[in-house]
Image (cartoon, helix red, strand yellow):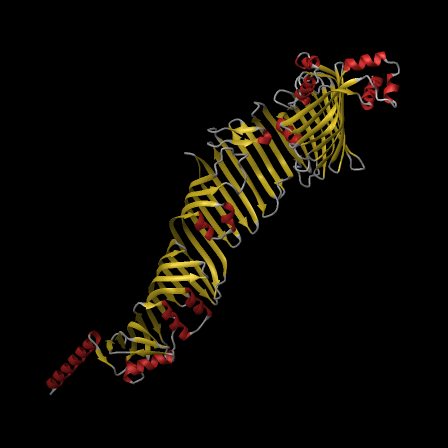
């Protein structure tokens, strides 16, 4: 009996084990529980239904659960049908035995499904603005995913769900500005955590890829962090214009070829508003071609071509909220040679900080005002540091140029937005200029005043610029109210002539010289002095005196061979109008082309010959004139000498028109006439016209390079001419 019981028990146990093995390995198929599974899904969302075929049950004896698997089911919602590859779930044996049918978890594996259909399904669970925007943005694409859900005892989904899968061939269009094609990636979604990996796409014709992008959700905010790589691509001018950014437009880029590596970090809310954006980029710039028309550099770089080519630049870009930091290094191509440039630009709100270092060898550099030229194939280093605000002042902390034994240095040079000088702390010049003159000059600032000292300075270009410029446009200063003390041993006023031991003071008020007192001497111990005072009527009174005017007159090319004499210049200036008197006494000249032409046309060849010989001597020269902007009006120019006398008036419009007329009289005729006629002055200055005394009238008119001279060799002298001669004789 016992043996029979053991045998039966063993058989039952064996059958039980076999059943367990069969249920665990093979399982059973049935439709018995289909309705219950469908009803469970309906409890989750009443708007969706499951179309189930055979359901397979597999036993898990270790966890006391039954695994339920169904192949090729379909999800039905709102007239749409999504084909599912497989649905898995686990049911506890206890719930199955007691006919409770509680689902512990659910795993759903999809086939390749259209993204727009997935969005429709998601909207059936919870409709939102984000899903609406996604539906509008997504034009095409497919998704395949595995969804894992777990349920509590009441049948509610737990928060430890997980969704994995991939998307491919996605097309997006965001406001017709950002177009995405061939987007593909893998994803892993958990509660408040999203991971996107192996991303590849084409955005606005730029190939992008990313190893990973992580998204963490905090309430209504999404924190996005990841790396984006762009493949090397070349953009032409027309493609760059489409980008429609003012910065790129201002640069006027013709072509660019580059690739980038970017680390990004930002927050975005459900309304797709971005904040706390941070970008760290490494840019490999193979080539950048810029048209040189956004800044006029031709006067400084005369061999600058229409296009500038930047090659092989390594650039790092850091953007954090309103702060942008750009640092780079690369080559600037010049013909087949290159120069090296390092640069740094920091933008903080509306303030820009810049630092540039340029190793300049293959370009010519001109600084016209300083008469300095760096030739090609000569090594030079340039450093420029400073800051500025948009539509505001520009502050240069440092401007440095070094070439062999030449140094030009400025510190804390501040310019207004219209590039006029506001202040400067110091400058240092120690360079050989184009006239082979060593310039050694130093400026220092003390409070609001300045001192300039040095061994030597070539002021030729500076003097030419001041003398040839329009007064209103020649003002270099902005809100400048300071005193400048000068003490310079040698100042060159042209290539060969110089003054020594220049000393004095300049006081500036409202950007203009209010008063000035300068004294110096020539190497022959002759002196020169300049005095400027502003009176209570705001009239600027100028007085210049020198007993060696030759170097000053020499600057005017139409007068050559000027010798001896002394010069006095006086002017009164107010409201842009200057009334002046220029006096030169006891001098002679060898060549005045226009004067020689008049003498020749008047058949006074003997006097004309004097110009090329010993020269014509004059006892006195006076010119009374007024100036306003580029118009000079000569009220009277009068010169007398043993050989000839001249009286002239007219006007000169700079670079446009010259119109002069006057009278020329050989002095011998005047002397003989005065000697032979008693009381000549009373007769000629009175009612009569001075019959019997003759001279020459002339007119000079035309553009500066097309002047015409007309001479009338027979004319009775006017009382005005005779009066001026007698006044001068009486004075002598």
Residue located 27% across and 84% down the image:
97
Pick whichever, 487 or 124, lies toward us: 124
Please indicate whether residue 703 sits to the left or right of residue 339 in the image.
right
- What is the x, y in percent for residue 123? 41, 73
Quadrant of the rendered image containing residue 412:
top right
Residue 279, can we see it? yes
Q: Which residue is at the far bottom?
A: 1
Question: The C terminus appears in which quarter of the rendering?
Answer: top right
In the rendered view, would you say 379 is above or below 123?
above
Question: Residue 167, image x and y in percent?
Answer: 34, 63
Q: Nearer the viewer, residue 19 or 378?
A: 378
Is residue 620 at all visible to an observer of this figure?
A: no
Question: Which residue is nearer to you in this view: 508 or 276?
Answer: 508
Q: Quadrant of the N terminus?
A: bottom left
Which quadrant would residue 30 be assigned to in this image?
Answer: bottom left
**Relative depth, front residue between 415 and 94:** 415
Tally of numbered tags: 0
The quarter of the displayed image where residue 186 is located: bottom left
Q: Position of residue 608 (x, y in %)?
A: 68, 15
Q: Is residue 445 left or right of residue 36?
A: right
Q: Position of residue 273 (x, y in %)?
A: 50, 62
> Is residue 53 shown above or below 529?
below
Q: In the rendered view, tell whether residue 122 sits above or below residue 723.
A: below
């Amino acid at each position: 009996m016992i043996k029979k019981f053991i045998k039966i028990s063993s058989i039952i146990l064996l059958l039980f084990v076999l059943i367990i093995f069969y249920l665990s390995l093979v399982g059973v198929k049935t439709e018995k529980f289909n309705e219950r599974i469908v009803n469970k899904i309906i409890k989750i969302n009443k708007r969706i239904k499951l179309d189930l075929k055979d359901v397979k049950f597999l036993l898990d004896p270790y966890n006391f659960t039954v695994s339920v698997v169904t192949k090729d089911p379909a999800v039905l919602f709102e007239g749409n049908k999504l084909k599912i590859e497989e649905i898995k779930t686990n049911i506890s044996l206890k719930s199955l035995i007691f006919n409770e049918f509680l689902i512990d978890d659910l795993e759903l594996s999809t086939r390749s499904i259209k993204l727009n259909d997935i969005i429709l399904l998601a909207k059936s669970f919870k409709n939102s603005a984000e899903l609406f925007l996604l539906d509008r943005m997504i034009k095409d694409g497919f998704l395949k995913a595995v969804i894992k859900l777990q349920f509590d005892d009441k049948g509610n989904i737990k928060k430890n769900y997980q969704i994995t899968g991939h998307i491919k061939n996605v097309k997006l269009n965001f406001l017709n500005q950002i177009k995405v094609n061939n987007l593909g990636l893998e994803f892993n979604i958990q509660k408040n955590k999203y991971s996107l990996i192996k991303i590849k796409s084409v955005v606005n014709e730029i190939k992008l890829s990313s190893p990973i992008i992580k998204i963490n959700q905090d309430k209504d905010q999404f924190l996005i962090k990841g790396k984006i790589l762009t493949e090397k691509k070349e953009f032409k001018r027309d493609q760059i214009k489409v980008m429609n950014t003012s910065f790129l437009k201002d640069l006027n880029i013709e072509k660019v070829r580059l690739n980038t590596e970017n680390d990004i970090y930002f927050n975005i809310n459900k309304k797709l508003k971005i904040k706390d954006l941070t970008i760290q980029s490494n840019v490999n710039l193979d080539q950048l071609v810029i048209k040189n028309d956004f800044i006029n550099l031709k006067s400084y770089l005369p061999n600058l071509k229409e296009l500038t080519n930047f090659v092989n630049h390594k650039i790092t870009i850091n953007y954090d909220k309103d702060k942008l930091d750009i640092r780079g290094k690369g080559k600037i191509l010049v013909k087949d040679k290159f120069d090296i440039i390092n640069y740094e630009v920091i933008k903080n709100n509306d303030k820009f900080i810049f630092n540039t270092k340029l190793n300049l060898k293959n370009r010519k550099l001109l600084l016209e005002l300083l008469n300095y030229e760096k030739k090609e194939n000569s090594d030079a280093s340039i450093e420029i540091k400073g800051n500025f605000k948009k539509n505001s002042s520009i502050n240069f902390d440092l401007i440095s140029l070094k070439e062999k034994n030449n140094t030009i240095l400025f510190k804390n040079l501040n310019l207004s937005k219209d590039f006029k000088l506001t202040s400067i702390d110091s400058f240092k010049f120690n360079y050989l200029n184009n006239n082979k003159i060593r310039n050694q000059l130093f400026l220092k600032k003390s409070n609001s005043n300045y001192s300039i000292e040095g061994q030597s300075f070539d002021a030729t270009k500076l003097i030419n610029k001041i003398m040839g410029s329009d007064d209103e446009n020649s003002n270099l200063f902005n809100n400048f109210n300071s005193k400048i003390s000068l003490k310079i041993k040698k100042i060159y006023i042209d290539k060969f002539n110089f003054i020594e031991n220049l000393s004095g003071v300049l006081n500036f008020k409202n950007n203009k010289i209010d008063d000035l007192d300068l004294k110096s001497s020539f190497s022959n111990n002759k002196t020169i002095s300049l005095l400027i005072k502003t009176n209570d009527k705001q009239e600027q009174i100028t007085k210049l005196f020198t007993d060696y005017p030759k170097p000053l007159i020499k600057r005017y090319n139409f007068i050559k061979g000027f010798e001896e004499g002394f010069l006095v210049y006086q002017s009164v200036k107010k409201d842009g109008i200057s009334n002046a008197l220029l006096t030169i006494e006891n001098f002679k000249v060898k060549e005045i082309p226009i004067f020689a032409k008049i003498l020749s046309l008047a058949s006074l060849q003997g006097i004309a010959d004097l110009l090329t010989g010993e020269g014509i001597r004059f006892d006195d020269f006076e010119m009374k004139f007024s100036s306003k902007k580029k118009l000079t009006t000569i009220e009277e120019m009068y010169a007398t000498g043993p050989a000839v006398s001249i009286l002239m008036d007219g006007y000169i419009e700079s670079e446009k028109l010259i119109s002069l007329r006057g009278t020329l009289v050989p002095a011998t005729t005047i002397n003989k006439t005065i000697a032979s006629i008693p009381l000549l002055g009373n007769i000629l200055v009175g009612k009569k016209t001075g019959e019997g005394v003759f001279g020459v009238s002339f007119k000079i008119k035309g553009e500066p390079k097309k002047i015409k001279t007309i001479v009338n060799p027979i004319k009775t002298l006017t009382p005005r001419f005779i009066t001026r001669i007698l006044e001068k004789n009486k004075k002598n």
